[in-house]
Amino acid sequence: MVAETATVQKQGEKLIANIGKVIVGKDETAKLLLTALLAGGHVLLEDVPGSGKTKLARSLAASLQAEFARIQFTPDLLPSDVTGMNIYNRKTDEFELHKGPAFTNILLADEINRATPRTQAGLLECMEEKQVTIDGVSYQLPEPFFVIATQNPVENAGTFPLPEAQLDRFIMKLSMGLPSQEEEQQILRRFGKEDPLKTLTPAITTEEFSQMKKKAETVFVHEAIEEYLVKIAAATRNNDKIIMGVSTRGTLALLHCAKAYAALEGREYCIPDDIRKLAVPVLAHRLVISYGYQQGKEAENLIAEILKKTEVPTEDFSQIR
């Protein structure tokens, strides 16, 4: 197993380095994005316009030699615009399936909060079941299937806030943040002549990625790590500042992400630092706090506070108890 996780680490580093040919200074964000993909989840990217969200999604798809599709979410977008529909063909006198952009490997749902709740809900089955149902018939989506949804945190006019049920479907919520002055100067030099995304070649294939995912699933989780994880989740449900804490789906999400992150680190077992590293991006957006909707920083601070108060286990995490 050691050799297997070492392979995951090597291939992960190749992917991150390849993405780094386009995206400057965001290796940690790329690693978390890859962690979410290995864990079988989806990501919500919340950032101001022009921070490179679309470039990051396209770079990941190009690095994996994966199919990519982008949907610009607008108030008049319908669920069928996402999933597809059956259209009547007069020549054959039959209905033909016209697949929507959801039939891809990496789907960028741009400005998802600009679509109506009905259309947002159209993504729920795609994200959870990895399938779409059209006129009563279910169709499996390609493997891997990864949704990267984006939203602007500062512009709320004409938007429809994502409901808790939808937010809970995202395994992580990430923010790229603005570059430093040095990084922005590198961006100017890199994109000054030609977009490097146009010449980006794959680092690995989707088949190789599937093998990475299988190897990540074999990472060992010590009972003490499970107890630590459950205590953190329980603390979110017993906090006066939190109306609704982390669901069981959120607890499982943190477990799967910890295993994927450990594999990317080349380890065959999880350690408490994996949980501490991932707790905020995996758990914070699932909290409903008493201050009202979209209190992102407050939720992150609450998770950080819970981490400080929760006793960290100190065992040999590579051994079965």
Image: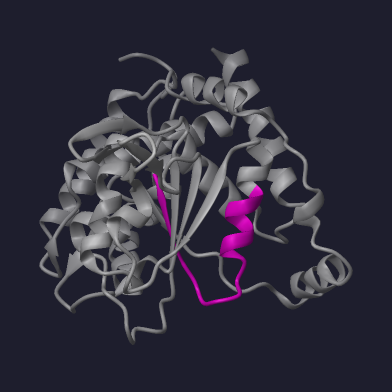
Q: From where the camera sits, is residue 129 visible?
A: yes
307 left or right of 264 in image:
left
Q: Residue at x 70, y 58 (%)?
A: 23
Give coordinates of residue 143: x percent, y percent: 46, 30
Q: From where the camera sits, is residue 229 visible?
A: no
Number of numbered callouts drawn: 0
Work out whether residue 251 or residue 11 is closer to the camera in this orientation and state it: 11
Instruction: Please determine whether, in this image, residue 296 is positioned above or below residue 174.
Output: below
Which residues fall within the magenta stretch? 42-59
Q: Residue at x 48, y 39 (%)?
A: 37
In the orientation shown, which residue stands out farthest toward the bottom? 157
196 left or right of 234 in image:
right
Quarter holding the C terminus is: top left
Q: Residue at x 59, y 50 (%)?
A: 30
Q: Quadrant of residue 318?
A: top left
Give coordinates of residue 86: x percent, y percent: 31, 43
Give coordinates of residue 304: x percent, y percent: 35, 61
